[in-house]
Image (cartoon, grey):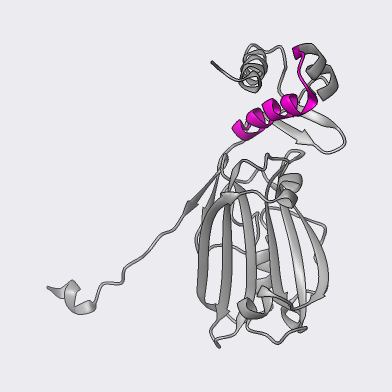
Amino acid sequence: MPSRRQVIADDIRDQISAGKFKTGERLPSEAQLAFRYVVSTPTLRSALAVLQGEGLVEKIHGKGNYVRYPRRRITYVGGGGTCAEAAAVVSHLRVTVRTTQLRAHGHLVGLLGVAARSPLTEFLCISHEGESPHGLARVYVPRDLAPDDVPEGLPFGKSLGVVLAELRPPLAEVQERVTARPATAEEAVLLRISRALAVLAITRVAIDNTGRVVEAAFVVLPGDRADALFITRHVTDEKDKKR
């Protein structure tokens, strides 16, 4: 026998499919829905969490629950750009960038190979599809390799990666580690997703041709709209070509 939360989730899902709740429309308040289904608020929120995990509903802090617009999938290309907008091979995303000056601490010391409390610049990049967040990245670079000024909003064609590349030697190596895990509380709020939804968490370390680590980036993409693509090119020996 289906649980009460599943029955409620099924009914709201059916109403969305039938167009009774339209895309972009705010659902009745949680109190109203709890009264309608004669359940407690925790049970109602549990039912909404099912729909949030399916990508049908998004909760906007301080505003309520909304029927989500269908999300177009994006592809993270391994070895590609620095920020969230460079990870998406689509042109409909808009990116905001927030810059913070800080000192190296914790895991950043080891990732960047710098002394503790070395000056760093953090770029928090959030890509948006319309008004809805689509992916995020935290990018850390040594202070001497950071631009003096980065606009709050970047056009897709001028990514943060392009800006940073102008200030450093060419890259010799990019190391990337991809993990699938549940979203953290902060990520769920920033991306308006359920904490039950799996995300692609990508740790990216870039090393220039002098051997210096010039960038550490943490990219987070919701699993309901993202794929990761890695291409390996094999160089054929000239002798093999002639055979």
Q: Is residue 175 above or below residue 50?
A: below
Residue 53 image point, x, y percent: 62, 34
Residue 158 visible in the shown view: no
Please name whichever residue, 81 or 200, is drawn nearer the observer in this view of the structure. 200
Furthest toward the right, the residue is: 62
Is residue 155 rendered to the left or right of residue 88? right
Furthest toward the left, the residue is: 243
Q: Quadrant of residue 8?
A: top right
Residue 68 image point, x, y percent: 69, 29
Q: What secondary structure is the stretch in magenta mostly built from?
A: helix
Residue 204 image point, x, y percent: 57, 67
Residue 42 visible in the shown view: yes
Q: Quadrant of the N terminus?
A: top right
Residue positioned 64% across, 11% down in the render: 18
Residue positioned 65% across, 66% down in the render: 162
Give the number of marks: 0
Magenta-highlighted residues: 37-55
Residue 173 image point, x, y percent: 50, 76
Is residue 168 rendered to the left or right of residue 39? left
